[in-house]
Image (cartoon, rainbow, N blue to C red):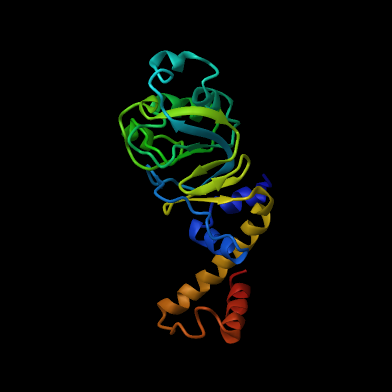
Protein backbone atom coordinates (compact mmCIF):
# COMPACT_ATOMS: atom_id res chain seq x y z
CA UNK A 1 0.00 0.00 0.00
CA UNK A 2 0.97 3.60 -0.54
CA UNK A 3 2.37 4.70 2.86
CA UNK A 4 0.38 7.94 2.73
CA UNK A 5 -2.82 6.01 2.00
CA UNK A 6 -2.09 3.63 4.87
CA UNK A 7 -1.51 6.52 7.28
CA UNK A 8 -4.73 8.24 6.19
CA UNK A 9 -6.85 5.10 6.47
CA UNK A 10 -5.57 4.55 9.99
CA UNK A 11 -7.26 7.77 11.12
CA UNK A 12 -10.37 8.40 8.98
CA UNK A 13 -13.63 6.83 10.17
CA UNK A 14 -15.47 3.96 8.55
CA UNK A 15 -18.49 6.28 8.50
CA UNK A 16 -16.57 8.67 6.24
CA UNK A 17 -15.37 5.79 4.08
CA UNK A 18 -18.90 4.47 3.54
CA UNK A 19 -19.93 7.95 2.41
CA UNK A 20 -17.05 8.12 -0.06
CA UNK A 21 -17.89 4.66 -1.39
CA UNK A 22 -21.56 5.62 -1.74
CA UNK A 23 -20.50 8.59 -3.87
CA UNK A 24 -18.80 6.07 -6.16
CA UNK A 25 -21.90 3.87 -6.39
CA UNK A 26 -20.97 1.26 -3.75
CA UNK A 27 -23.80 0.59 -1.28
CA UNK A 28 -22.71 -2.68 0.33
CA UNK A 29 -19.23 -2.24 1.82
CA UNK A 30 -19.90 -2.32 5.59
CA UNK A 31 -19.78 -5.76 7.23
CA UNK A 32 -22.94 -6.56 9.20
CA UNK A 33 -22.77 -8.05 12.69
CA UNK A 34 -18.98 -7.68 12.99
CA UNK A 35 -17.48 -5.57 15.81
CA UNK A 36 -14.10 -5.15 17.47
CA UNK A 37 -13.37 -7.15 20.59
CA UNK A 38 -11.78 -4.04 22.12
CA UNK A 39 -11.10 -0.37 21.48
CA UNK A 40 -7.93 0.05 19.44
CA UNK A 41 -5.63 3.06 19.33
CA UNK A 42 -5.78 3.37 15.54
CA UNK A 43 -7.84 1.86 12.76
CA UNK A 44 -7.05 -1.65 11.59
CA UNK A 45 -5.91 -1.38 7.97
CA UNK A 46 -4.51 -3.96 5.58
CA UNK A 47 -5.05 -6.07 2.45
CA UNK A 48 -7.27 -9.13 2.86
CA UNK A 49 -6.05 -12.70 3.04
CA UNK A 50 -9.24 -14.76 2.82
CA UNK A 51 -10.47 -18.09 4.21
CA UNK A 52 -13.75 -19.72 3.11
CA UNK A 53 -15.69 -22.13 5.31
CA UNK A 54 -18.60 -24.43 4.53
CA UNK A 55 -20.67 -26.37 7.09
CA UNK A 56 -18.76 -29.09 8.93
CA UNK A 57 -19.25 -32.79 8.24
CA UNK A 58 -18.75 -35.33 11.01
CA UNK A 59 -16.52 -37.77 9.11
CA UNK A 60 -14.09 -35.05 8.01
CA UNK A 61 -14.04 -32.48 10.79
CA UNK A 62 -12.32 -34.36 13.59
CA UNK A 63 -9.51 -33.34 15.93
CA UNK A 64 -6.90 -35.17 13.84
CA UNK A 65 -7.68 -32.95 10.84
CA UNK A 66 -6.17 -29.95 12.64
CA UNK A 67 -2.72 -31.59 12.66
CA UNK A 68 -2.52 -31.41 8.87
CA UNK A 69 -0.25 -28.46 7.86
CA UNK A 70 -2.42 -28.07 4.74
CA UNK A 71 -5.58 -27.52 6.78
CA UNK A 72 -6.79 -24.24 5.18
CA UNK A 73 -7.43 -22.45 8.47
CA UNK A 74 -4.01 -23.35 9.89
CA UNK A 75 -2.24 -22.76 6.57
CA UNK A 76 -3.83 -19.30 6.30
CA UNK A 77 -2.46 -18.39 9.71
CA UNK A 78 1.00 -19.65 8.75
CA UNK A 79 1.05 -17.87 5.38
CA UNK A 80 -0.76 -14.59 6.13
CA UNK A 81 1.71 -11.88 5.11
CA UNK A 82 2.88 -9.14 7.49
CA UNK A 83 0.55 -6.16 7.27
CA UNK A 84 -2.34 -8.24 5.93
CA UNK A 85 -5.73 -8.84 7.55
CA UNK A 86 -6.97 -12.44 7.83
CA UNK A 87 -10.65 -12.41 6.79
CA UNK A 88 -12.76 -15.52 7.45
CA UNK A 89 -16.10 -16.35 5.85
CA UNK A 90 -18.06 -18.28 8.47
CA UNK A 91 -21.46 -17.75 6.81
CA UNK A 92 -22.46 -15.48 9.71
CA UNK A 93 -22.55 -18.50 12.04
CA UNK A 94 -21.28 -17.48 15.47
CA UNK A 95 -22.29 -20.67 17.30
CA UNK A 96 -18.63 -21.69 17.36
CA UNK A 97 -15.24 -20.01 17.28
CA UNK A 98 -13.24 -19.35 14.13
CA UNK A 99 -10.04 -18.98 16.17
CA UNK A 100 -8.64 -18.62 19.66
CA UNK A 101 -5.74 -17.06 21.51
CA UNK A 102 -3.07 -19.43 20.16
CA UNK A 103 -3.90 -18.73 16.52
CA UNK A 104 -4.28 -15.02 17.20
CA UNK A 105 -0.90 -14.94 18.96
CA UNK A 106 0.69 -16.65 15.97
CA UNK A 107 -0.80 -14.01 13.66
CA UNK A 108 0.38 -11.25 15.99
CA UNK A 109 3.95 -12.58 15.93
CA UNK A 110 3.82 -12.94 12.15
CA UNK A 111 3.00 -9.23 11.88
CA UNK A 112 -0.61 -9.49 10.73
CA UNK A 113 -2.56 -6.22 10.75
CA UNK A 114 -5.71 -7.82 12.15
CA UNK A 115 -8.42 -10.47 11.93
CA UNK A 116 -11.99 -10.19 10.66
CA UNK A 117 -14.59 -12.96 10.90
CA UNK A 118 -18.36 -13.11 10.76
CA UNK A 119 -18.13 -16.09 13.11
CA UNK A 120 -17.26 -16.29 16.79
CA UNK A 121 -13.95 -16.01 18.63
CA UNK A 122 -12.99 -18.07 21.68
CA UNK A 123 -10.65 -16.81 24.43
CA UNK A 124 -12.23 -13.42 23.79
CA UNK A 125 -10.97 -11.91 27.05
CA UNK A 126 -7.26 -12.49 26.44
CA UNK A 127 -7.59 -11.68 22.74
CA UNK A 128 -9.30 -8.40 23.58
CA UNK A 129 -6.16 -7.40 25.48
CA UNK A 130 -3.82 -8.20 22.57
CA UNK A 131 -2.25 -5.59 20.31
CA UNK A 132 -3.78 -7.49 17.35
CA UNK A 133 -7.14 -5.94 16.30
CA UNK A 134 -9.81 -8.65 16.09
CA UNK A 135 -13.31 -8.04 14.69
CA UNK A 136 -15.91 -10.79 15.02
CA UNK A 137 -19.58 -11.62 15.54
CA UNK A 138 -18.98 -12.15 19.26
CA UNK A 139 -17.41 -14.52 21.79
CA UNK A 140 -18.07 -18.24 21.35
CA UNK A 141 -16.34 -21.10 23.16
CA UNK A 142 -16.79 -24.22 20.95
CA UNK A 143 -13.97 -24.97 18.49
CA UNK A 144 -14.37 -24.23 14.81
CA UNK A 145 -14.72 -27.77 13.45
CA UNK A 146 -17.98 -28.25 15.37
CA UNK A 147 -19.68 -26.16 12.66
CA UNK A 148 -17.05 -25.01 10.13
CA UNK A 149 -15.06 -26.84 7.46
CA UNK A 150 -12.33 -24.62 6.00
CA UNK A 151 -12.03 -25.34 2.30
CA UNK A 152 -9.80 -22.73 0.66
CA UNK A 153 -7.72 -19.61 1.10
CA UNK A 154 -7.20 -16.51 -1.05
CA UNK A 155 -10.41 -16.80 -3.04
CA UNK A 156 -13.40 -14.41 -3.11
CA UNK A 157 -15.60 -14.82 -0.04
CA UNK A 158 -18.61 -13.29 1.67
CA UNK A 159 -18.05 -11.87 5.16
CA UNK A 160 -20.77 -10.06 7.05
CA UNK A 161 -22.85 -10.00 3.88
CA UNK A 162 -20.16 -8.23 1.84
CA UNK A 163 -18.02 -9.54 -1.01
CA UNK A 164 -14.34 -9.62 -0.06
CA UNK A 165 -11.70 -10.33 -2.70
CA UNK A 166 -8.08 -11.18 -1.84
CA UNK A 167 -6.14 -7.93 -1.65
CA UNK A 168 -9.16 -5.74 -0.88
CA UNK A 169 -8.32 -3.16 1.78
CA UNK A 170 -9.99 -3.82 5.14
CA UNK A 171 -10.49 -0.87 7.50
CA UNK A 172 -11.87 -1.37 11.00
CA UNK A 173 -12.75 1.10 13.76
CA UNK A 174 -15.21 1.37 16.66
CA UNK A 175 -18.19 1.23 14.26
CA UNK A 176 -17.05 -1.91 12.45
CA UNK A 177 -15.31 -2.91 9.22
CA UNK A 178 -15.41 -1.49 5.68
CA UNK A 179 -14.08 -3.15 2.51
CA UNK A 180 -12.37 -1.00 -0.13
CA UNK A 181 -11.43 -2.36 -3.56
CA UNK A 182 -7.65 -2.00 -3.72
CA UNK A 183 -7.69 0.07 -6.93
CA UNK A 184 -9.84 2.73 -5.22
CA UNK A 185 -7.95 2.94 -1.93
CA UNK A 186 -5.69 5.87 -2.80
CA UNK A 187 -8.41 8.18 -4.09
CA UNK A 188 -10.91 7.17 -1.40
CA UNK A 189 -8.37 7.86 1.35
CA UNK A 190 -7.53 11.28 -0.10
CA UNK A 191 -11.17 12.31 -0.44
CA UNK A 192 -12.03 10.90 2.99
CA UNK A 193 -9.35 13.09 4.60
CA UNK A 194 -10.75 16.15 2.79
CA UNK A 195 -14.28 15.26 3.90
CA UNK A 196 -13.25 14.94 7.53
CA UNK A 197 -11.44 18.27 7.44
CA UNK A 198 -14.59 19.98 6.15
CA UNK A 199 -16.78 18.14 8.68
CA UNK A 200 -14.49 19.21 11.51
CA UNK A 201 -15.25 22.81 10.58
CA UNK A 202 -18.97 22.14 10.14
CA UNK A 203 -19.11 20.53 13.58
CA UNK A 204 -17.61 23.65 15.18
CA UNK A 205 -20.31 25.75 13.47
CA UNK A 206 -23.14 23.46 14.54
CA UNK A 207 -21.75 23.30 18.08
CA UNK A 208 -21.72 27.12 18.12
CA UNK A 209 -25.43 27.19 17.28
CA UNK A 210 -25.53 27.39 13.47
CA UNK A 211 -28.66 25.89 11.84
CA UNK A 212 -28.44 22.87 9.55
CA UNK A 213 -29.72 24.67 6.40
CA UNK A 214 -26.72 26.14 4.61
CA UNK A 215 -24.28 24.58 7.08
CA UNK A 216 -24.79 20.86 6.60
CA UNK A 217 -24.57 20.34 3.70
CA UNK A 218 -22.55 23.54 3.28
CA UNK A 219 -23.61 26.28 0.91
CA UNK A 220 -21.19 28.63 -0.89
CA UNK A 221 -20.93 31.01 2.08
CA UNK A 222 -20.10 28.18 4.49
CA UNK A 223 -17.50 26.78 2.08
CA UNK A 224 -15.88 30.22 1.85
CA UNK A 225 -15.76 30.39 5.65
CA UNK A 226 -14.21 26.92 5.65
CA UNK A 227 -11.42 28.00 3.29
CA UNK A 228 -10.65 30.97 5.56
CA UNK A 229 -10.68 28.65 8.60
CA UNK A 230 -8.23 26.28 6.89
CA UNK A 231 -5.84 29.13 6.10
CA UNK A 232 -5.97 30.37 9.68
CA UNK A 233 -5.09 26.87 10.92
CA UNK A 234 -2.19 26.41 8.50
> In the drawing, does residue 214 fall left or right of residue 141?
right
Who is closer to the viewer here, 165 or 20?
A: 165
Quadrant of the frame with the C terminus? bottom right
Q: Position of residue 15 (x, y in %)?
A: 49, 60
Q: Residue at x 56, y 71 (%)?
A: 198
Residue depicted at 52% across the width and 73% down the height? 201
In the picture, residue 127 is in which quadrant? top left
Number of numbered labels in the structure image: 0
Query: Can see residue 43?
Result: no
- Where is 128 relative to 218, above or below? above
Left or right: 168 with respect to 74?
right
Quadrant of the frame with the N terminus: top right
Q: Position of residue 226 (x, y in %)?
A: 58, 77
Asked where in the image residue 138 lies, by quadrant, the reply is top left
Can residue 64 be seen in the rendering of this structure?
Answer: yes
Q: Nearer the viewer, residue 12 or 91?
A: 91
**Residue pictured at 54% horizontal, 60% vertical:** 27
Q: Between residues 231 and 152, which one lies in front from this camera angle?
A: 152
Amino acid sequence: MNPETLATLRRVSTATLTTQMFKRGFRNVFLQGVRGLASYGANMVGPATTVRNIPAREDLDVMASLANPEHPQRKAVETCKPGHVLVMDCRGDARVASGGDILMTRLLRRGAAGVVTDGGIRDAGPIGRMALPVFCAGPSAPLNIVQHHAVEIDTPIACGGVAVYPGDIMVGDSDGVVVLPAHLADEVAKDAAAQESLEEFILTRIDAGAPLPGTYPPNAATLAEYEAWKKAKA
